[in-house]
Image (tube, rainbow, N blue to C red):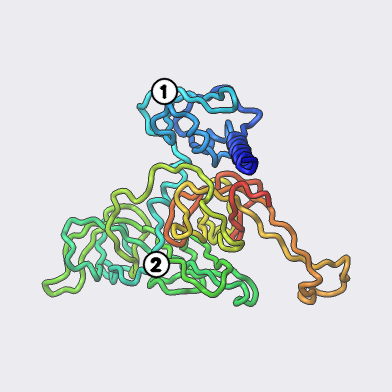
């Protein structure tokens, strides 16, 4: 009986401790807050809580709300006794607020996708009047669209980068390198039209994580192949990037992305080195708040939209020149004469688009730039 009582007490204390941690509030929060159009769950949670990614757990303390995830402009949020969040519903004339600012990520939600393979997709083989580039109003000629119906709309997409994971020991100098793709989707050394700088994450062996494809424009099918010609004709009907031979064709998606993102911690802790920043948008090597980054984990790893990570600069492995001398080059110091420095916190990122092996996230906050190769950890990781 005594052992059972101790167990019950231990569970109760654990539960209370967990709840206390979950409802830790900021000391400078206002007494009430009226939700405005353009707010995000992250920003609102940051007003009340020290850890914005725990907002869903706090919101569950309000059984009077039919859907604890959804709050709307006009709702009044206040802190009641025992640090519990109280909510007074306002009008429901506006759409509910979400975890990330959609205006910031919508271009990436619409225009980027990751695929395991793309060679099987229909492709642009030539352009009107034998042009090298085509834009709105021009005809483009496509192979592989047999059976499609005239009037159907398609997106023109372009393979730009291949994401790969490679064991750190298999590379002589640096674990990161560019894997830009040419007009056929094959590797080249540089293509400055790409939207990303790609990288390789350390792991045992080499693994293909996927190809990133950017949407160039859209078009409508005006004529199918046959009657003496081998291609279908697509008329570009939207402004965008110029189409070129080698671009791929996919059906237009009516709703290519989710509209709601609820911040929450990852479902599991990853082995060190498994979850890393593998790219920064717009050819950048580093990013800050409201920049988009690509992550080396995806749906197969339990990642979904709204997953929050903390971002860390990997601690350097430096020579102990005080102990072992300062009169030799860096390469001459062995493992025994080096010291590993701690990782350094950089910021937080929230996932907004998830694929099987790769995901995209928006940097929500940061105290230093985020760079390719930085480690991703639980948002509460102390080091």
Question: How far across and how far down the image is residue 40, in percent?
Answer: 49, 36
The tag on residue 101 is none
What residue do we see at 43% from left, 55% from top? 354
Residue 382 appears in the picture as rendered: yes
Question: How far across and how far down the image is residue 85, in percent?
Answer: 53, 28
Q: Quadrant of residue 355?
A: bottom left
**Direction left: furthest residue:** 227
Q: How many marks?
A: 2
Question: How far across and how far down the image is residue 43, in percent?
Answer: 54, 36
Kind of element beneath mark 1: loop
Of 141 and 199, which appears nearest the observer?
199
Vertical side of 363 occupied by 343: above or below: below
Circle 1 residue: 90
What residue do we see at 46% from left, 62% from top? 357
Circle 2 residue: 116
Of 28 and 94, which appears nearest the observer?
28
């Amino acid at each position: 009986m005594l052992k059972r009582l101790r167990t019950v007490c231990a569970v109760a204390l654990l539960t209370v401790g967990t709840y206390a941690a979950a409802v830790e509030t900021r000391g400078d929060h206002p007494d009430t807050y009226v939700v405005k159009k353009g707010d995000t769950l992250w920003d609102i949670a940051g007003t009340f809580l020290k850890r914005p990614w725990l907002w869903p757990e706090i919101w569950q303390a309000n059984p009077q709300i039919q859907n604890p995830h959804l709050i709307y402009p006009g709702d009044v949020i206040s802190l009641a006794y025992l640090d519990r969040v109280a909510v007074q519903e306002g009008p429901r004339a506006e759409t509910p607020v979400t975890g990330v600012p959609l205006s910031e990520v919508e271009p990436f939600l619409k225009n980027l996708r990751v695929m395991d393979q793309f060679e099987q997709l229909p492709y642009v083989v030539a352009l009107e009047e034998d042009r090298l580039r085509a834009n709105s109003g021009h005809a483009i000629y496509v192979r592989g669209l047999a059976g499609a119906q005239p009037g159907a709309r398609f997106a023109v997409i372009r393979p730009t980068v291949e994401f790969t994971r490679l064991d750190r020991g298999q590379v002589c100098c640096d674990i990161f390198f560019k894997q830009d793709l040419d007009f056929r989707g094959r590797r080249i050394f540089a293509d400055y039209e790409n939207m990303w700088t790609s990288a390789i994450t350390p792991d045992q062996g080499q693994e293909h994580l996927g190809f990133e494809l950017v949407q160039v424009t859209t078009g409508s099918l005006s004529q199918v192949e046959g009657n003496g010609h081998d291609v279908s004709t697509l008329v570009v009907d939207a402004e965008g990037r110029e189409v070129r031979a080698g671009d791929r064709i996919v059906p237009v998606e009516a709703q290519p992305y989710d509209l709601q993102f609820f911040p929450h911690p990852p479902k599991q802790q990853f082995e060190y080195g498994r979850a890393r920043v593998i790219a920064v948008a717009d050819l950048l090597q580093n990013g800050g708040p409201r920049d988009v980054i690509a992550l080396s984990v995806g749906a197969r790893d339990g990642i979904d939209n709204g997953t929050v990570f903390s971002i860390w600069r990997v601690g350097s492995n430096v020579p102990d020149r005080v102990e072992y001398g300062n009169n030799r080059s860096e390469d001459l110091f062995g493992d025994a004469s080096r010291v590993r420095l701690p990782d350094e916190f950089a910021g937080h990122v929230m996932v907004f688009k998830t694929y099987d092996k790769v995901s995209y996230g928006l940097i929500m906050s940061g105290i230093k730039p985020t760079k390719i190769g930085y480690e991703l950890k639980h948002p509460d990781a102390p080091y």
